[in-house]
Structures are given as structure tokens and as C-alpha cells.
Amino acid sequence: MEAYDEWVSTSWQASESDPSRSPEPEPWQVQQPEPQWSQPPFAPGYQEAQQFGYPTAPPPQPALPDVVSGSVLIPGGRVPPAGGLESTLRVISGLLWPLVIAVLIFGGGSWWFGIIFAIIASAVLKQITRELRRRRVMDSRIVPPPSQPTQDLQ
């Protein structure tokens, strides 16, 4: 056990009087200067030098042209506002449930009949207004053919 104590120190701090220690620090004790980062300039075309073996970013791709030419395949049409019938049906559909609930609470009547009537009536009104809206949108997308013959894309 005494031989072990001679080779292994239990002290965390090195003793100054130990003649076996060399004055130079061990290689793992030598402190390397820490690499410093600096802000690169924001100049167009500036390429930062490759450091520390990291790959640099790929060169920028050429910019796409700003203007695209050619014929318009799907022209943008304006959807006309809803007609009188569609607007009236939407108002009735919105007032249906509050009206049925008010009639059932204040006026009496069968609760089952009122709820079933409101479910069926709101479904029918919703489908009618959806179909009217679909027709209105589709009519706005129909574009008459151009009077001039189209040129082939080259």
C-alpha cells in the first residue's frame, strides 16, 4: 500500500516542492488560443474564406427573370355578387334556428316536430344556396374564345 501512495497523489493541488515535476506544463495543460468569430461584411459578391475545415456555402444560383411572358391559360374572372333569391335564402337560413327555438319556447308546439323541421329545412336551404353559388361562380369563369387566332408558343 505504501508503494501505491508514492505514485498516486491524493492532493488536488500540485505541491511546489515536488522535484520530480518538470517546470513545463504537460501537453494537455497547454492552453490553446480560442478561435474568435468576426462579423463578415455585407458586401455583394463577398466570399468568406474557408476556415476550420468547414465547407463553404455553394455559390448562389443565377436569379430568375422578373418578367414571365406568354399567354394566360386561365383568365381571372370577377365573381358577380349574389342575386336576390340567393341572398333571401341565406337570410332565411340564418334566422331559421333562432325562430324555431323562439316558437317552441313561447308558442308551444311539439319539440320533436320543431327540431326535425329545423334540421331538414336548414339542410335543404344550405344545399340550394350552395348550388346557386356554384352556378354563379362557374358562369363567371366562362370566357368567350378570342377573336384572333392564338399563336403557338415557341
Image (cartoon, rainbow, N blue to C red):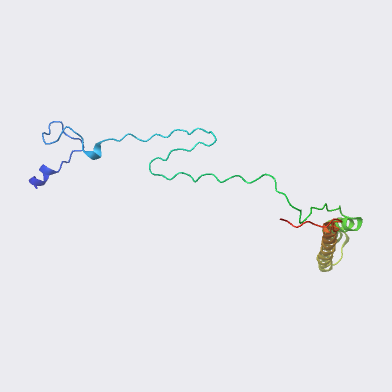
Q: Answer with left or right where residue 48 lies relative to residue 106.
A: left
> Is residue 61 positioned above or below 107 on the image?
above
Q: Which x, y percent locates residue 22?
A: 15, 34
Q: Which residue is at 50% across, 32% downward?
A: 41
- Residue 41 visible from this viewpoint: yes
Q: Does residue 95 appear anywhere in the picture?
A: no
Q: Nearer the viewer, residue 98 or 92?
A: 92
Residue 136 left/right relative to 58: right
Q: What residue sits 12% from the left and 31% below the top? A: 17
**Front residue of this view, candidates 64 and 113:** 64
Marker count (numbered): 0
Q: Position of residue 42 (x, y in %)?
A: 53, 33
- Residue 151: quarter of image: bottom right
Residue placed farthest to the right in the image? 84
35 left or right of 127? Answer: left
- Tell me residue 47's x, y (percent): 48, 38
Which is nearer the eye, 51 or 151? 151
Give the quadrant of residue 55: top left
Quadrant where the C terminus sits is bottom right
Q: Residue furthest left?
A: 2
Rendered residue at 38%/44% (across/down) = 53
Residue 40: give x, y in percent of width and height: 48, 34
- Vertical comparison of 110 with 143: above or below: below
* Viewer-closest of 33 and 45: 45
In the image: residue 100, left or right of residue 12: right
